[in-house]
Amino acid sequence: MPPSQKGPVPLLGAGLQFELLSALDSKDFRVRKILVAARAAGIPVALKTCSAEAIGEQAPAAKALALRITRPTSAHPSYITQSNAIVRTLIDASETSGLYGDTEFARSQVDSWLELCWLELETPLAVLQQAKGHGDVIAEAKKLILHALTAVNAALAARTYLVGNRLTAADIALACAAQPILGAAASVLSGKDLATLPHAARWYMTVTHHAAFATGTSSSRGGGGGGGAAARAGVSAAALAAANSTVDAAFYQASAVHTDKPLSMVAPAKYRRRRVRVKELLARGAAAAGETVVVRGWLKTARSGAKDTLLFLVVNDGSCHSSLQVVASRDGTEGFAAAASCGGVGACVAVEGPIIESPAKGQVIEMQAKKVEVLGPVYQSDGSIGAADYPLAKKAHSLEYLRTHAHLRPRTMVYSAVMRVRNAMAYATHRFFNERGFVYVHTPLLTGADCEGAGEQFVVTTLLPAAAEGHACGGRVELPRLADGSIDYTKDFFSKRACLTVSGQLNVETYCSAMSDVYTFGPTFRAENSHTSRHLAEFWMIEPEIAFADLEDDMNLAEDYLKYLVAHALEHCDEDLTYFESKDCPGGEADLRARLRNVLENDFVRITYTRAVALLEEHIASGKVKFQNPVSWGVDLASEHERYITETVYKCPVVVTNYPKEIKAFYMKLDADGKTVSAMDILVPKIGEIIGGSQREESFDVLSQRAAAMGLEPAAISWYADLRRYGTMKHAGFGLGFERLILFITGIENIRDVIPFPRYPGHCEF
Amino acid sequence: MPPSQKGPVPLLGAGLQFELLSALDSKDFRVRKILVAARAAGIPVALKTCSAEAIGEQAPAAKALALRITRPTSAHPSYITQSNAIVRTLIDASETSGLYGDTEFARSQVDSWLELCWLELETPLAVLQQAKGHGDVIAEAKKLILHALTAVNAALAARTYLVGNRLTAADIALACAAQPILGAAASVLSGKDLATLPHAARWYMTVTHHAAFATGTSSSRGGGGGGGAAARAGVSAAALAAANSTVDAAFYQASAVHTDKPLSMVAPAKYRRRRVRVKELLARGAAAAGETVVVRGWLKTARSGAKDTLLFLVVNDGSCHSSLQVVASRDGTEGFAAAASCGGVGACVAVEGPIIESPAKGQVIEMQAKKVEVLGPVYQSDGSIGAADYPLAKKAHSLEYLRTHAHLRPRTMVYSAVMRVRNAMAYATHRFFNERGFVYVHTPLLTGADCEGAGEQFVVTTLLPAAAEGHACGGRVELPRLADGSIDYTKDFFSKRACLTVSGQLNVETYCSAMSDVYTFGPTFRAENSHTSRHLAEFWMIEPEIAFADLEDDMNLAEDYLKYLVAHALEHCDEDLTYFESKDCPGGEADLRARLRNVLENDFVRITYTRAVALLEEHIASGKVKFQNPVSWGVDLASEHERYITETVYKCPVVVTNYPKEIKAFYMKLDADGKTVSAMDILVPKIGEIIGGSQREESFDVLSQRAAAMGLEPAAISWYADLRRYGTMKHAGFGLGFERLILFITGIENIRDVIPFPRYPGHCEF
């Protein structure tokens, strides 16, 4: 088990914009440090000069410097003050900069240096500037500076960078501050003092050759020469270029290089995307104006204008819901003719050109294409280019229609949004359990175990092979038979009858009985002939299992987990959730996020099954409600009952506990009354049951009796009973159907629309 | 797709110990801030008073304060300096504290306040202390303090805490610094000034009631009364208690509360473990001495001593390789008799008692049990307690033997270590791809597609049901037949022949063609009758697929990914890797970590297949090597060839590219020479091939020709060919067999020993 992968949820969201409000001189160390770090991190920051008072009015904790963060979804910007906190914010907002090092320990060391830089270098340097004529003050400040740089020098004796093997914010901050000491026009320390700092001097040269220190006017794109010279001239030119305009246009020059060429000093990674993702570009908002970028993706729409001299392309690459608007012109765009006849919607293109602020409503930026390259046109069945045969050429399609084109539907708005949410929920699941020290166990899909769900299992076999010739399934196959005519499974691949699992629980309990806290996340199967909108033959399930835990612990863990997922979705999938609430989304749910927040903000109500039945009976008796299915103690609750309890009675999630033993599995712990078991189902509005779990029977004798009462052979469960024979303990767990979770989070109605390739009776396409 | 879940790899590892070296007065703000934050984070810190010179000798960047971090696996401690950096380090090392807030933005805000606290509160307060008699200096400092607290007050007008809805390090730092201003003995500001700070005053009361501020002498365990009073007395008592002893014994009182009762102010989570994990306890090292804790787990060994008046128990809960040593005595331990006759190895126990520094060699701490509770004894088949029938009772078992007890083998050292590594590698995989914006796609396990691997596929069917009665598989089953005698699959569950997938690649390409960067991570199946140590019938595979990418991009991504995994293992699984290197581990590999570091530190060599064949032929001709399998251009490389290239010729990972088209799949991109395809295999020492990938053929025509040449029906691949018909693009991907990766990382020899329940011909147990 690895240590917790905690760390906070990241800040970076779609459309985030950063603006540095500064009342300081543009050459100030702090401004320079922030701008260079932002550039190295690939985060655009606009610099705005204000009075200290104006800054203080917006951010009371600020004195002369504040970072304003604007989200397109919120009218209220947020502020970060203090220069090092601003540097941390920006480099944390970068996906790839690595400016905080590779490990948490590196992060701590970077922090150490950032603070040393401020306290022992920047502060005495500031004193030095203001202390003209006061010899003693100057001498004291120089002493402090030499002390700090001596520590830097010592740290660099055997290393290239201050922390780890790569450039970090520590190098940037110290190099910015050290410029008047180690730069070309150094004057603060004496030559004799400088001679004691050879490692620091070498390091300074290395660091300031980094592209982030280059001036905006000489792009490094052309090679080492010009950029190198600019870098050698020190950081002041870059800082000036950056600081003298409201939008740091120079940044984008470096950024374009960043996309095309590896900045090996920053990131030793070899893989580079040769394009900007639409999500990343739109996140920059108006700050991206002026940048020339390459975007690759598929056309959502393509229409002509101004007598066919203009072409309006909407390009999406699946990275987010929104698309990039691209304007191409017959005169100004290379490849215009090909683009105009590429088949339209669905064609794959590369577009290149400057980003401008968009004059159109509803979008902040657009691209004026200098070049459009058609990577993949849309072909018709006769081999010509054209939209006639493309199944998604028209705009409006029902979810049912799209299901018949499951290989193309990820290109639609609704499915790509569902898939992004699905991805987020899978990752949040792994994070949740890893943060809590759980071990992920890959329980088997193929099972020879015979102890549950035999009637709903698929058989897996090699007794029914394809015909020898080709790949069709022809020719007569005879099954090996025993004397009584039944199938001789000893001749099958596994020398026994093997099935697809219906749950990993029994298997994962073996790991729980050794590693304490475990979970599964994998596919499970049901051969039920069910055609509802809530059932699939193949679906994914998450099943945690906790040792030394009872039903209450189980409920607590399940509630924490579900709330974690909801919080993660609200935080990370805002754009997609907004879309699911809109009328553009087929079957969109207007108050989706309100429903989710309700789950987050309420303690889950906990009632017994007995109480739930009494409640339903009361409501029926008083005429408040009528159900199709009868209710009485002993019957399982139907979906209509569950939804009534959670949606109408309590209007929040409800945990129903202690069900009659007859309607639950043999492994659930028998309660003291001998009638019920320590099971729990969590019901949520819109879905009904979303989680089912139980404390497990830990007594060998009780388990054996319960299994026998349910008709299970002792031999079939002997391995499972072994866990009670050898070192048993209280334990509990639950299962969450992953697709039901996605229905719950997205508001989509049919479970077939939240899994890439749905399998259900009669359907196993692609 | 969520934003990147970047953030550095955490610091916390097994056995990490923190010691605060301080030359400051124990009442100093900085010391207090660090100790209270550490307590709130649940991180034990020993305080050691030293001279400033002594600290500077160890940590050159330090002045009067440094955090020493010791790992049991390294002889060299690391140092963090600067008080805020130390606070950050400690709260980052906590799995659950939440002291940095819930989001990256909250983290930034916490940073802002931490720096404001230092610059505008702690610094002027320090000035105040030293400025006796200098009225102007005092007035200026008070002005600064009032300014800072006014900002704090304004921020708290509508909130309980400074950041978000929970206590963070910002509250702790500011409350510590604000004690002389807002505490009971406040004297710095005038009553008039204080009256302007009502929100700050309320906040100060709230924060300092937190358990982390309580003094150690009055445990909060007994309830709110005593602890509350202690808290109300302010932080100085706690800080003194903490600062006056080398080991902060008081901390553990609070820590014990932390385990039993939720600190609702810190963590709103409901689920609490009612025990300390062995990993967490041992990580505290000697600092844990004095604490009374509850540990639950299974006995690794149990032996009697001193004429049966003592009992030495070794308790492991699977959280880490190491176990807790527990000493029980007939006189001093409740439950001694039951513990002495619980069946020994494998029994499940709860042990409770104080931790002491261990007099024994090879372990830092042990428990003197006050109470041992036998939760689950080991039973014999006659129902009596005893070790006779427990399959793992004896110590030494071969991996082959343990395989026959797959439900119990996670209780052994070697399997639990393998499973922790497996968990770490799964999580690292999700992190790697999420950090890079890839979308996780659950490709289907059941497939009706007919376009590859038909000969190796398992059929999934409901045509072979279990007999109606019971769960046995008796009775004659007749297959539905077509006129020619072949099986009528239209009568099967999916109305067609369905199989288990051999790869998710073709399916995931449909998502790549819409969302650009995607990956799968799921089970795949091969019905090969293979009995080698490298093949399983069910195994897990990771398959990324990248749009707008060629073979070189593919190789770059694969190299980055493999190095990321290795780095993650070296960082997070050190204790387990150390064990795999030891003689205690069956088949341990002495230089395992050196082999892994070799992968990390070298650029992968890249050669063409043609060059590889020529190379092998040269070496054969010159008598350097002999192979069992012949080598010539056109044949696939055998494992012995691959391992010779990577292990003997280059001694580092090697990427072999551009294989003859005849030996590779139809979907691989045909090279310009018409003879080879843009495929690549990555070979690593010890394993041979670990990754296989290719650029995909993006041309509809070439793909169709290649498929036809390999005998595929156009209809079978029409959905796949659609991706080339509608908006095709360059793309590439690769597959990594997850179990081969685990072999590679752990040095284990047989693939059946790195998956929980191995499936291979004749074996589908449990």
Image (cartoon, coloured by chain):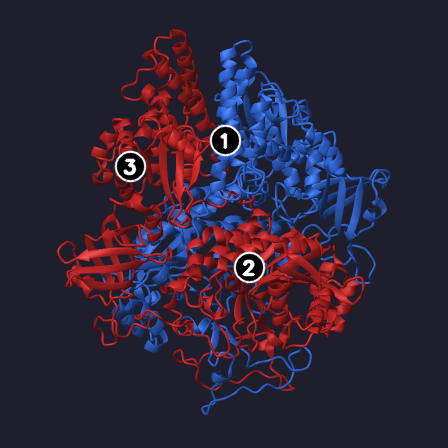
Chain colours: A blue, B red
Mark 1 on the same chain as mark 2: no
For the question of whether residue A626 can be seen, the reply is no
Q: For the residue carrying disc 2, how many other residues have a C-alpha within 10 Å: few (<14), some (14-19), or many (20+)? A: many
Marks 3 and 1, Cα distance to the nearest angstrom? 28 Å
Q: For the residue carrying disc 3, how many other residues have a C-alpha within 10 Å: few (<14), some (14-19), or many (20+)? A: some
Q: Residue drawn at (60%, 77%), measured in percent from left and top?
A: B489
Q: Position of residue B708 (x, y in %)?
A: 76, 72
Q: Amino acid at mark 3?
A: Thr
Q: Is residue B448 left or right of residue B174?
A: right
Residue B220 placement: quadrant: top left
Chain ID for label 1?
A
State which mark lies toward you, 1 or 2.
1
Quadrant (top left/top right/bottom left/bottom right) for the C terminus of chain B: bottom left
Vertical position of residue B88 compared to residue A504: above or below:
above
Where disc 1 sits, the SS reads helix
Q: Position of residue B13 (x, y in %)?
A: 41, 48
For the question of whether residue A106 can be seen, the reply is yes
Chain ID for label 2?
B
Where disc 3 sits, the SS reads loop
Q: Position of residue A537 (x, y in %)?
A: 52, 66
Query: Which of the pair B414/B267 is nearer the observer?
Result: B414
Q: Position of residue A602 (x, y in %)?
A: 39, 42
Q: Residue drawn at (59%, 85%), measured in percent from left and top?
A: A477
Query: Which of the pair A441/A131 is nearer the observer?
Result: A131
Q: Is residue A587 left or right of residue B397?
A: right
For the residues labelled 1 and 2, say whether their Cβ atoms are less than 8 Å apart.
Answer: no
Q: For the residue carrying disc 1, how many other residues have a C-alpha within 10 Å: few (<14), some (14-19), or many (20+)? A: some
Mark 2 on the same chain as mark 3: yes
Q: Which residue is mark 3?
A: B246
Q: Which mark is residue B521?
A: 2
